[in-house]
Amino acid sequence: MKAAHDRSEPWIVYMVRCADGTLYTGITTDVVRRVAEHNGEGRLGARYTRSRRPVRLAYMEPACNRAAAARRETVIKQLDRAGKLALCADTP
């Protein structure tokens, strides 16, 4: 059985674009799984995204550990919409 978090997995800060155009920011070690959860697979999707499905991955960046990911998530959440969209636009 796999541990809840394998220490070799990097933490990732991500943003998803909801069907209504809003952006949701979070952290995870598995972006594919987390986006699927936001889209209704399993019971772990965020309450915010439940009524705004489907969501699409709009941005992601690696972090060296959970604490760094959480700090970066806080910084991104404090950006205005234009700042968040600029981050998404800079992502290939």
Image (tube, rainbow, N blue to C red):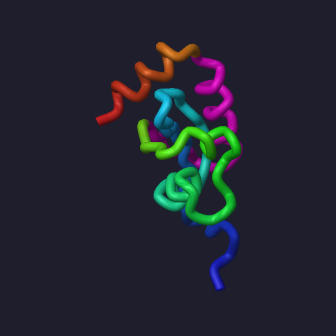
How far across and how far down the image is residue 78, in percent?
65, 20
Give the residue displayed 62% in from the left and 46% down from the top: 50
The answer to which quarter of the image holds residue 88 is top left
Which one is in front, 49 or 23? 49
How far across and how far down the image is residue 23, in percent?
53, 30
Residue 77 belongs to the span the image colors magenta: yes
Give the residue displayed 69% in from the left and 70% down from the top: 4
How far across and how far down the image is residue 7, in percent?
63, 65
Which one is in front, 45 or 83? 45
Instruction: Pick out the residue farthest to the left.
Output: 92
Instruction: Pick out the residue farthest to the bottom.
Output: 1
Residue 48 belongs to the span the image colors magenta: no
Picture quarter with the C terminus: top left
Which one is in front, 65 or 48? 48
- Magenta stretch: helix, strand or loop mostly: helix
**Relative horizontal placement of residue 77, taking residue 39 as reference (left or right):** right
**Relative horizontal placement of residue 68, taking residue 13 as reference (left or right):** right
Give the residue displayed 56% in from the left and 63% down from the top: 41
How far across and how far down the image is residue 32, in percent?
47, 58
- 79 up-or-down from 10: above or below: above
Count of all numbered marks drawn on residues in the image: 0
The magenta stretch spans which residues?
A: 59-79
Give the residue displayed 35% in from the left and 25% down from the top: 89
The answer to which quarter of the image holds residue 1 is bottom right
The answer to which quarter of the image holds residue 63 is top right
